[in-house]
């Protein structure tokens, strides 16, 4: 901080030196005139000072020193300290702004990568694609058509980035745990990226070895 204030003071002096020289040259005649006008009063003050007792002279010198210190503090030191404090505050604010920008940049990068990954894991962009047909065909092979109580296409949902979320709600009745595993494995190994977003399994009351399953399958596509 001391080095900074010293450099700042040097720059201010170098900047103001030419203007100060011109101003001093212009004011020199006026200053000389005022000095000549004040010279009698100055001689009177000197004479009075010389006439004072030694103790009184010391008191006058102390008072003069205190006045000089107050002047330097109020008009020199205090403004420089305030300037340094203001600069420190502005630097801290800029550092906080920079940290926020860096966090936003990291968030943007993460979202960009997430969007790229989502776009990579999308179903083929084709009007002929049907998540309903894909899931129904898989379940017919894995658990059998008779176990499918219902299968209903959901409403397509538009997502940011030009993506569309397809969904299918389905119910399986009286399936074994092995068949539940087969159904989930069938979803996992489909030729297109399909995920299970919701799964609820309830045991049959009359047959404790059988279960009813409610499941929602979803897929992302690049268009409706």
Image: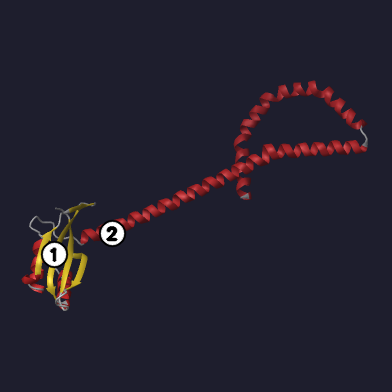
Residue drawn at (71%, 25%) of the image: 28
List x then y, in percent, for residue 148: 9, 68
List x then y, in percent, for residue 88: 56, 47
Q: Nearer the viewer, residue 142 or 208?
A: 208
Residue position marked by numbered label 2 in the rendering: 114
Of badges 1 and 2, the one in the foreground is: 1
Residue position marked by numbered label 1 in the rendering: 170
> Secondary structure beneath disc 1?
strand
Classify residue 41 as left or right of residue 220.
right
> Secondary structure beneath disc 2?
helix
Q: CA distance from mark 1 to mark 2?
A: 29 Å
Question: In the rendered image, which quarter is residue 49 located in?
Answer: top right
List x then y, in percent, for residue 43: 86, 26
Residue drawn at (15%, 62%) of the image: 169
Q: Mark 1 near mark 2, Cβ–Cβ under 8 Å? A: no
Q: Nearer the viewer, residue 216 or 173?
A: 173
Judged from this view, the residue extending furthest toward the left is 146
Q: Earlier in the sequence, mark 1 or mark 2?
A: 2
Compared with residue 210, is residue 126 higher up or lower down, i.e. above or below?
A: above
Residue drawn at (81%, 37%) of the image: 63
Residue drawn at (64%, 28%) of the image: 22
Classify residue 99 as left or right of residue 184.
right
Compared with residue 132, is residue 68 higher up or lower down, i.e. above or below?
A: above
Compared with residue 9, is residue 216 higher up or lower down, i.e. above or below?
A: below
């Amino acid at each position: 901080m001391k080095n900074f204030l010293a450099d700042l003071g040097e720059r201010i002096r170098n900047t103001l030196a030419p203007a100060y020289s011109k101003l001093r040259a212009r004011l020199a005649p006026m200053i000389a005139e005022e000095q000549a006008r004040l010279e009698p009063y100055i001689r009177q003050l000197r004479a009075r000072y010389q006439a004072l007792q030694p103790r009184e002279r010391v008191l006058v010198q102390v008072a003069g020193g205190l006045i000089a210190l107050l002047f330097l503090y109020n008009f020199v030191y205090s403004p420089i300290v305030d300037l340094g404090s203001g600069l420190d505050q502005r630097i801290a604010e800029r550092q906080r702004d920079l940290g926020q920008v860096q966090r936003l940049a990291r968030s943007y990068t993460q979202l960009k990568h997430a969007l790229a990954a989502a776009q990579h894991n999308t179903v083929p962009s084709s009007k002929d694609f049907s998540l309903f047909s894909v899931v129904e065909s898989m379940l017919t092979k894995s658990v059998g058509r008779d176990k499918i109580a219902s299968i209903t296409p959901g409403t397509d949902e538009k997502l940011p980035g030009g993506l569309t979320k397809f969904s299918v709600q389905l119910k399986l009745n009286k399936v074994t745990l092995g068949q539940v595993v087969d159904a989930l494995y069938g979803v996992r190994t489909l030729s297109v990226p399909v995920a299970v977003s919701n799964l609820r399994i309830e045991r049959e009351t009359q047959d404790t070895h059988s279960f009813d399953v409610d499941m929602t399958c979803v897929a992302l596509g690049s268009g409706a």
